Amino acid sequence: MDKALQTMINNMLEKTGKSLDQWKSILKDKAFVKHSEGVNFLKKEHGVTHGFANTIVTLSKDEQHTSDDLVSNQYKGKEALFPIYEKLLSVVNSFGNDVTVTPKKTSVSVIRKRQFVLIKPATKTRIDLGLKLPGEPTTDRLGNSGPFGTMCTHRVQITSESDIDQELTDWMREAYIKSE
């Protein structure tokens, strides 16, 4: 399990008033069609912050799917992209101990107080990196959000580890800072 996710689970009782198992018990009888419905329920009805609500819903969906399973399923048939994913995680985890990595079915959200990076293996040869950089102009490399819609303001297409250069690291750090 990712270190940041484990830390979040360890802090859940103190920060939310309930353990992960208690939250899972609350959600087990609910039939939310969309992930966001569960997140909104926890935020509105129980006052849980977005990061914890998102993690609770993700981990409550299917006991058989661990975070590692979710990530490995994303990279089936796209194994050549996995070193790029690992390098991206290494970069964002270096920003601070308040970074939470939350794997979902088709992507991985990276959250501080809110999501600032989204990592998605888009094709067999490309990862789409979504960034929350409100007010930043688009460039040839820092494109519009594309398929991410409002989840991100920008998208960078990554095809090799060498694409994770200082410019990209600076954009990710800026997104991290703005997510405070």
Image (cartoon, helix red, strand yellow):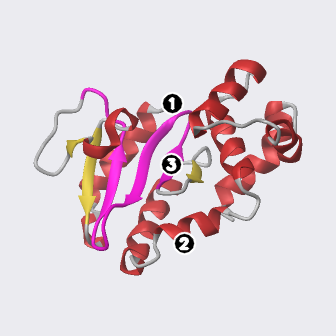
Secondary structure at numbered mark 1: loop
Q: Mark 1 or mark 2, which is nearer the start of the sequence? A: 2
**Residue annotated with mark 3:** 109
Up the image or down, 94 lies above or below 78; here it is above
Residue under pointer 2: 72
Residue at the location (72% across, 56% down)? Answer: 62
Question: Which residue lies under the disc numbered 1?
Answer: 180
Could you tell whether 64 is left or right of 144 in the image? right
The quarter of the displayed image where residue 49 is located: top right
Looking at the rendered image, the quarter that the N terminus falls into is bottom right
Task: Report x, y in % for residue 74.
Answer: 48, 67
Q: Residue furthest left?
A: 140
Residue 123 colored magenta?
yes
Q: Which residues are magenta?
A: 107-135
Measured from the top left, where is residue 135 in percent x and y?
25, 26
Q: How crowded is the residue under tag 3: few (<14 C-alpha within 10 Å), some, or many (20+)?
A: many
